Image (cartoon, grey):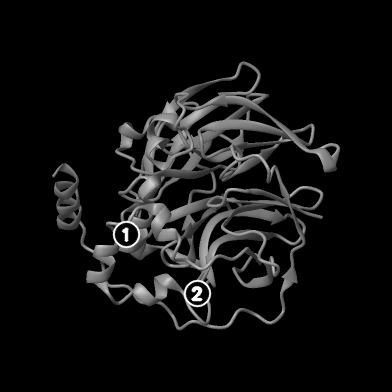
Amino acid sequence: LATCLGYVALLTDLAPAPLAFPPLRPLPEEKVPLHVELLFKDDPTFRGPESFVVLEDGSLVTGLADGRIVKILLSPKNNAQYETIMRTGEDLPTCGDLASEPVCGRPLGMRAHPSEPDHLLVIDTYLGLLDVDLSARRSEVLVAPSVGNFSMMNDMDLSADGKIVYFTNTGRFPRNQIHRNLIEARPTGSVWSYHLDTRALAPVAMDLAMPNGITLSYNGDSLLVCSTLLSAVYDIPISADPSGEERAPLKASMIQFFAEDLQGTPDNIRRLDPHRKTYSVALGSKRALPFSLPQFLAPFTTLRKLLCLLDLETMTAFIPRSGIFIELDEAGTQVAHYQDLEGESNWYSEVEHVEGFFYQEAGGHRSLLELE
């Protein structure tokens, strides 16, 4: 009875918005093929790395689906190993399951701390913005979700001077129900700033459609924010010399797009090549001929409402998988399309350049990949 009442409440609460996309196109004929190596593919506990930071010694730090933050040693390359630094939440036998995420934690976006050596700034979508001390193996909460009524804190970046953290709140449903943000298609997301010195928290942009990955532009005067729902990238202007003082947030209607009509659902965006001033955009799934599930469902609001009753794992099973990331230039024009043509990897979440490319998939079981 309780389950039935929960379904009724969910259906009553949901109001899918009308949604339209540009027509589907074939993927570009010119593709850069990815030859990938799956790291830790035989370790069932190494699942769902979302974002990572490269340390000075060349090792990587990332967060896993079970709430752990781990350090990966890549040398020798044919015998990569990792160690657990800490867990952001509680340590339970069920950690790694979607239902346990709010208790065990789920680290998402992360960056090196600008002024504290051996510290990271990490967004745990359920626990907030954390200052993680890698040496002491503990963390401090800087911004709790309850402070801003944040349902899904997601990714982050820093201002050019390192004093301000900018982070995304993807929508009104939490991460283990993220498909409901996508299906409902309401602009309930936002971007916020947090001043590390003054601890001032302020909204930067509101009424956004599933803002996800975020990166500071090369010139430092705007934030490039992926809209997973719209298959686009927002270009959100910020002060060239941010003071941290609160100001009126921008509305979506006041914000232009940096890139539109992407052929996939964008996850994280990162500065890729500083010499050419290009950006990497990881695509969680493709949006191209012959079929795209979001494109197919867009006009059917009643059907989308019913599909919200499905859980995340069931819903994602219907989405065709692919391993794709694209490269955008400083004007937002796509200059390269990278794809795993063998289909060994999928659900890419972030791409960075570290003596080659390292990239991850957030949805699969074998998650960290290496491209030489």
**Horizontally, is 116 left or right of 261 in the view?**
right
From the image, tell me which residue sits under label 2: 261
Where disc 1 sits, the SS reads loop
Q: Residues within 10 Å of mark 2 (few under 14, many from 20)?
A: some
Q: Residues within 10 Å of mark 1 (few under 14, many from 20)?
A: many
Q: Amino acid at mark 2?
A: Asp
* Residue 274, above or below 202: below
Where residue 323 sits, quadrant-wise, is bottom right
* Residue 370, above or below 330: above
* Residue 83, above or below 209: above
Nearer to us in this view, 150 or 278 = 150
**Horizontally, is 229 left or right of 360 in the view?**
left
**Looking at the picture, how far across and down is residue 92, in whole percent?**
45, 26
Nearer to us in this view, 241 or 269 = 269
Instruction: Tell me the quarter of the image containing the C terminus.
Output: bottom right
Where residue 272 sits, quadrant-wise, is bottom right
- Residue beneath the point at 32% across and 48% down: 173
| Residue found at the very far top of the displayed protein | 136
**Horizontally, is 359 left or right of 73 in the view?**
left
Where residue 304 sits, quadrant-wise, is bottom left
- In this view of the protein, can residue 170 be seen by the observer? yes
From the image, tell me which residue sits under label 1: 187
Q: Earlier in the sequence, mark 1 or mark 2?
A: 1
Instruction: Tell me the quarter of the image containing the N terminus.
Output: top left
**Looking at the picture, how far across and down is residue 217, in whole percent?**
59, 54
- Residue beneath the point at 37% across and 39% down: 99
**Looking at the picture, how far across and down is residue 316, in whole percent?**
44, 59
